[in-house]
Amino acid sequence: MGLPGQELIIVLDFGGQYSHLIARRIRELKVFCEILPSSTSIEKIREKKPQGLVFSGGPSSIYLDQAPVCDPAIFELGIPVLGIGYGMQLMAGMLGGRVSPKDHGEYGETELITLDSRDVLSALGPVEQCWMGPGDRVESVPPGFVVTARTARTPVAAMAQPDKHIYALQFHPEVIHTARGQDILQDFLYNVCGCRGLWTMASFLEGAIAEIRRQVGSRKVLCALSGGVDSSVAAVMTQKAVGDQLTCVFVDHGLLRRDEAGQVQKTFREKFKINLVFVDARKRFLGKLAGVTDPEQKRKVIGEEFIRVFEDEAAKLGDIDFLVQGTLYPDVVESGTATAAVVKSHHNVGCLPQDMRFELVEPLRWLFKDEVRLLGQEMGLPEEVIWRQPFPGPGMAVRILGEITQEKVDLVQAADAIVEQEIRKAGLYRQIWQSFAVLPDMRSVGVLDGKRTYTHTVVIRAVNSVDAMTADWVRLPYEVLEAISSRIVNEIKEINRVAYDITGKPPATIEWE
Ligand code: XMP
């Protein structure tokens, strides 16, 4: 899918940890932005007709053998360029400046002294806070360039060749610790590249709907709906595009959050009038899970059974040519970074078998998560769907340790509902990445009305994260913990003890299994 009619900025990715962030910041400024590998050919870049290019930072030194480079002809395209960190050093090296490879020990928040406040630095005062990355430094600028800012230890903290619209920053404007960073990007986009800010969710929606219509024509489309924000937004977009040609399949494996199944039916059937096949597969999943205690085995059983159920439903519907998937932009971006080792075999509605010969419809493949939420809002999806915290495909199965039984599912769902209610009541639900209950495979001794009890323990987990790769446990206020704990032990008689998980990821993971 292309995005006709959009202004475009290309971020050339030199492996920096902030490449996605640069793209997000640019989109926040209402200009569409794509991330492409630094090795992208000059022809491809020219073909895309970008208004501007940003060279990302990166962990390398330009003096290393494997250091990523770009085609030098890039500087002759007449397209404005903004180099950041490694992007600046590379530019300096390629254009005849001198770059020093030594460690300058200047890292983190630093005072930036502006020497020439034209163009991209026009919003800056004489001294501003900026965030410096580690690595090489430019010692002398290439011919035709001027030094536009410095710091106490970095004589060339920014440089420019205004005639050619080439600018470079040793510091990172995309991180929040650079006080006027967003102003710098805004000046680059609007004053240097001449962008007008055409990227809005309304404009995207219009183009994306037209694109789905073009792709699908009058044929039939299937969507595996999980109730999460991505598949929900993708389904509603597709329905707006092709109406009744879309059928959604929602599989209730019995391990959902309480009321989730009902809510999905209400939203999609009643509000959006989507053809929804609701499969009550609770018995089927519980049957398959009987006696299974190993976490990976549980995931495997659920993943496989999900596929079987889905295949059965697709076969019943017949003649389906397309499958909607809620793939997001970060999954699409080609990047030189190595993939992480698999810690858990994830199951989600996207993992359908290869041999199901559907063509994919991926209406969210250009979007970041926060943009998907904005789009959901634009289309009138309920807040509960848009802001629902992430939930694993195997659901409560990975939050019930040991064998899964209906009794345990009921217990963990009840405790989880209390956690959610109290977190919402405290106004914390949206700020927290995930908050939920876990049922370990253990009982402990308690006392109730003077009598001994020997019942279940529940663990509360609340974490904050940016991308789920790492997470920190949330310092929940004691009053909230108290409310959760007393409600759980008062309202669920089979639970006599509540614990709070105070472990980050790593070394723990977010889910317990
Ligand atoms: P962990 O437990 O690995 O989880 O720290 C990271 C994030 O992924 C979610 N998660 C899953 N999501 N299918 C999913 O769609 C899965 O199998 C799965 N397992 C974990 C988890 O909730 C957290 O947000």
Image: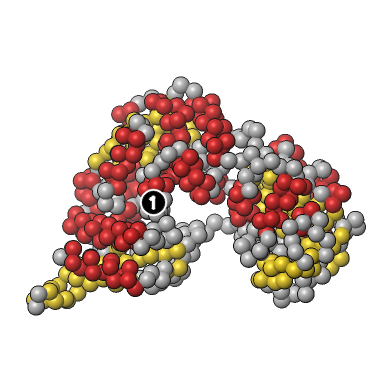
State the residue in front, 457 or 149. 149
Q: Look at 69% across and 51% down and name the residue there.
A: 186
Residue 396 appears in which quarter of the rendering? bottom left
Relative vertical location of residue 150 with respect to residue 243 in this rendering, above or below: below
Residue 381 seen from this side: yes
Name the spot of residue 334 as percent of width and height, x first: 60, 48
* Helix, strand or loop at mark 1: loop
Q: Is the residue marked by circle 1 packed among few (<14), some (14-19), or many (20+) residues within 10 Å?
A: some
In the image, is 138 to the left or to the right of 284? right
Q: Look at 61% across and 35% down and name the residue there.
A: 3
In the image, is 137 to the left or to the right of 59? right
Relative vertical location of residue 430 with respect to residue 74 in this rendering, above or below: below
Q: Look at 48% across and 40% down and name the residue there.
A: 378
Residue type at mark 1 is Arg
The single residue placed furthest to the top in the displayed view is 218
Relative vertical location of residue 437 with respect to residue 220 in this rendering, above or below: below
Q: Look at 76% across and 47% down and name the residue there.
A: 191
In the image, is 474 to the left or to the right of 176? left
Name the quadrant of the N terminus. Answer: top right
Name the spot of residue 38 as percent of width and height, x first: 70, 51
In the image, is 43 to the left or to the right of 252? right
State the residue in front, 116 or 391. 116
Residue 69 seen from this side: no
Q: How many labels, in total? A: 1
Relative vertical location of residue 509 with respect to residue 40 in this rendering, above or below: below
Residue 97 appears in which quarter of the rendering? bottom right
Name the spot of residue 294 as percent of width and height, x first: 30, 61
Q: Which residue is mark 1?
A: 388
State the residue in front, 61 or 168. 168
Name the quadrant of the C terminus. Answer: bottom left
Residue 235 appears in which quarter of the rendering? top left
Name the spot of residue 371 as percent of width and height, x first: 52, 46
